[in-house]
Amino acid sequence: MSASAQYDVAIVGGGPVGAALGALLRRGAEGRARRVLLLERELPDLQKPAPTTDLRVFALSRASERILRAAGAWEGVVAIPAAACAYERMHVWPRDAEPRGEGSLTFDAAELGEADLGHIVGNDALQRAALAAFIAAGGEARTAEVRDLRFTERGAELETSSGTVIADLVVGADGGRSVVRRAAGFAVEAQDYGQLAIVANVASERAHEATAWQRFLGEGTLALLPLSSGQSSIVWSLPRERAESLLAAAPDIFDAELTQASAGVLGALHLASERRSFPLRRVSAPQYVRERCALVGDAAHIVHPLAGQGVNLGLLDAAVLAELLAAAAAEREDLGALRVLRRYERWRKSDNEVMSLAMDLLNRFLAFGGEGAERVVQRGLGWVGRSAVLRRPFAERALGLAGELPAIARRHSA
């Protein structure tokens, strides 16, 4: 790559959010940028089959599905065998309540006239589908490591392991430890929850019923997410010391502890994969943009995973940025101009901060609340559970259909 390589948009980070943004920028009315480059340190080989086991999964909302359809990626997701599992219900209950009794809460897609509430999709399948859609739309993907970022009269200049890239706009989609964020001088506010999330796939004595199960434990949260294989993916958030003990425990001991934590809602649970973990923290960039640079997804914000909203927020970031850049291109505005990028920041920052605060409060008062908090929560869940009117706004939020949405997330899929 020569020093004269010039692009409209250079996206750093080839995960699902960065690749989906690139595809949106290259497709139809949602994106008019002609020259879009995606840089990623390790691009998957799209000629090889996707891994059969993926321990990192996402609960994609209806809004995310619509965004991925507009990006041309959804067809790729569903084309991968067993990559996506639709879930029809979400069932939540606190520690002191019976799994299906008073104080529990169920959201059902049928109440909303929907076929499902969303899909559980593995990270590998989602990334591959989004990258394939980006390349099919005429985007350029390169394996390269970003070493520096400068802003000059020529534009944003990226020094990479394969040469210099100049772009009207650089987008940081490179995760929670974003190189772009640091190099561009963005501040960051971070909070360590002192927790680890244990992830694994498990077999269950009873069928998962196409339901996402979640229990607040008083010492964390356990989610059981349905997979097409009939197994479930667990996300078990616990204080670090407790989590490390379980990670080191023999499989039979882990199985027994996990079954107890689930209150036996699916019967006995047994490990069907290795166990992994990742630390939990809350991260927020006070600013998402500066002249010729914008942050999306985890580079801008990380929320607690207890409601599975992280990638959904990132895909909304991508859709909004693509929509606003398309409008700017139609008006022949400079895509990297601060006045253009501020529109994106104003639109997405408030919604992301509300979600981050909500997840923080849920973690504090539901997952770790004392007895008084648990009684209030149990009573509140009971009220919501008995009222279709009260359940509906929560269900719409789960579908990703609440709030100010970009046009492609509001559309009904064909």
Image (cartoon, helix red, strand yellow):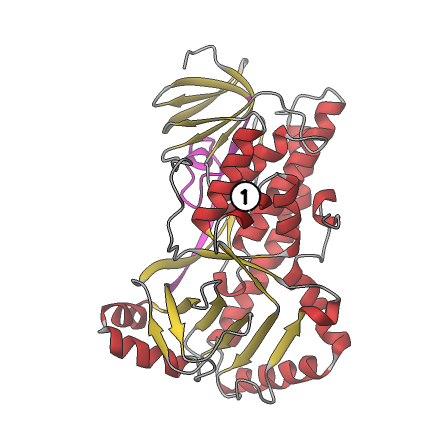
Q: Nearer the viewer, residue 394 or 50?
A: 50
SS type, badge 1: helix
Q: Position of residue 12 (x, y in %)?
A: 47, 32
Q: Nearer the viewer, residue 320 or 139?
A: 139
- Among the 4 quarters of the image, the one containing residue 36: top right
Q: Is residue 81 left or right of 35 when viewed as pictured?
A: left
Q: Nearer the viewer, residue 19 or 336?
A: 19
Residue shown at 37% from the left, 56% from the top: 53
- Give, as a single range, the part of the protein colored magenta: 168-195
- Among the 4 quarters of the image, the one containing residue 334: top right
Asked if residue 88 is among those painted magenta in the image, a careful observer would answer: no
- Please tell me how crowded label 1 is: few (under 14), some (14-19), or many (20+) other residues with Cα within 10 Å: many
Q: Position of residue 44 (x, y in %)?
A: 39, 38
Q: Is residue 30 left or right of 227 when viewed as pictured?
A: right
Above or below 60: residue 389: below
Location of the N terminus (image quadrant): top left
Above or below 128: residue 142: above
Query: Mark 1 = which residue?
Result: 76
Asked if residue 191 is among those painted magenta in the image, a careful observer would answer: yes
